């Protein structure tokens, strides 16, 4: 049973709470297979989407999840809001609350923004990605997708490959997978490996060929070109040559290995199109599962007593 009113990160969740959310998502996945995909549990509730960074998958799936649950939805657009006149983040959130929002879904370039807004007592804050800190619903939908293929998490070997330094997806997935008993391998250039990662219960590789040996799941990460402040590698071509997931490299894993990517992808940089669109790719399934997982998150956190 989840007690916190806010979903701030996977770090704060117990393994039991993670499974509570995944079980609810499984029920909502069944709802989404029906002819009529809309159910009433959030009728009368209001969900506000506050996205201060670009998003396709997370924003649209939270919006659709809220609508499938019969909630009213406010989609806050930063460029046309009073943020551009200098309104503070807290005043913006308090204004949204004054309009009656029950849940605020927030994405922001600064780590810790959801934690800051969680001081507001009578709304639930859902972290949709904060800087390089966490992206909890991405990790939850990744777990859901892995479970649907592998039927378990404990004992699996999962490789997370690429730009770990700038990746909130990597952090949330490391916390989630290790809590549930998977063995996590990080494969990345030493220049994209943050120092604090060494304290976590993971294996670290700087070679794709060694790191991919016998893994069950590969999670490729987007090279976050917009967050690169200095030259972490000589060129995109060099990065692709050393860390791109090609058909040859995928064959080093095994034929049942699934390939994941949170999106958006840089095709020809971290992943080849032949792999992204190939038989072992579950990348679009991740997107589909994101809807059921976000329905579960909204449903559960709307029900927590505030
Ligand atoms: N995976 C993910 O967060 O994608 P978007 O940036 O499109 O939401």
Image: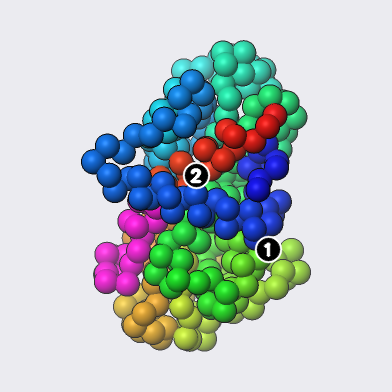
Name the disc covering residue 93, or none. Answer: none
138 up-or-down from 184: above or below = above
Q: Residues within 10 Å of mark 1 (few under 14, many from 20)?
A: few
**Residue 291 at what x, y percent from top left?**
40, 45
What residue is pinned by disc 2?
296
What residue is pinned by disc 1?
194
Task: Give the structural element (helix, strand or loop) at label 1.
Answer: loop
Magenta stretch: residue 17 in it?
Answer: no
Question: What's the magenta bit mostly, secondary-structure-wise?
Answer: helix
Locate the C terminus by quadrant: top right
Q: Residue at x 33, y 67 (%)?
A: 281
Q: Residue at x 59, y 34 (%)?
A: 303
Question: Which residues lie in the magenta part?
Answer: 273-290
Task: Give the structural element (helix, strand or loop) at label 2.
Answer: helix
**Residue 242 at what x, y percent from top left?**
46, 76
- Disc nearer the start of the sequence (2/1): 1
**Residue 258 at what x, y percent from top left?**
39, 72
């Amino acid at each position: 049973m989840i007690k916190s009113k806010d979903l701030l990160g996977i770090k704060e969740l117990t393994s039991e709470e993670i499974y509570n959310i995944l079980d609810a998502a499984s029920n909502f996945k069944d709802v989404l297979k029906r002819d009529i995909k809309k159910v009433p549990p959030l009728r009368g509730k209001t969900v506000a989407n506050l996205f201060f960074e670009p998003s396709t998958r997370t924003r649209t799936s939270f919006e659709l999840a809220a609508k499938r649950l019969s909630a009213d939805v406010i989609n806050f657009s930063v460029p046309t809001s009073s943020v551009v006149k200098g309104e503070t983040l807290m005043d913006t959130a308090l204004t949204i609350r004054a309009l009656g929002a029950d849940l605020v879904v927030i994405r922001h370039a600064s780590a810790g923004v959801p934690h800051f807004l969680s001081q507001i007592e009578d709304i639930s804050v859902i972290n949709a990605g904060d800087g390089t800190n966490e992206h909890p619903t991405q990790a939850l939908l990744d777990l859901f997708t892995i479970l649907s293929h592998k039927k378990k998490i404990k004992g699996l070997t999962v490789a997370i490959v690429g730009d770990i330094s700038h990746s909130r997806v990597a952090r949330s997935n490391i916390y989630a997978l290790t809590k549930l008993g998977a063995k996590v391998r990080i494969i990345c250039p030493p220049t994209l490996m943050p120092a604090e990662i060494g304290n976590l219960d993971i294996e670290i590789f700087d070679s794709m060929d060694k790191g991919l040996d016998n893994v069950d799941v590969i999670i490729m990460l987007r090279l976050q070109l917009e967050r690169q402040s200095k030259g972490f590698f000589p060129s995109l071509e060099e990065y692709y040559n050393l860390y791109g997931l090609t058909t040859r490299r995928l064959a080093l894993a095994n034929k049942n290995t699934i390939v994941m990517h949170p999106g958006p992808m840089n095709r020809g940089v971290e992943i080849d199109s032949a792999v992204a669109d190939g038989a072992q790719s579950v990348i679009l399934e991740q997107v589909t599962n994101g809807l059921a997982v976000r329905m579960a998150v909204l449903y559960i956190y709307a029900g927590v007593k505030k």
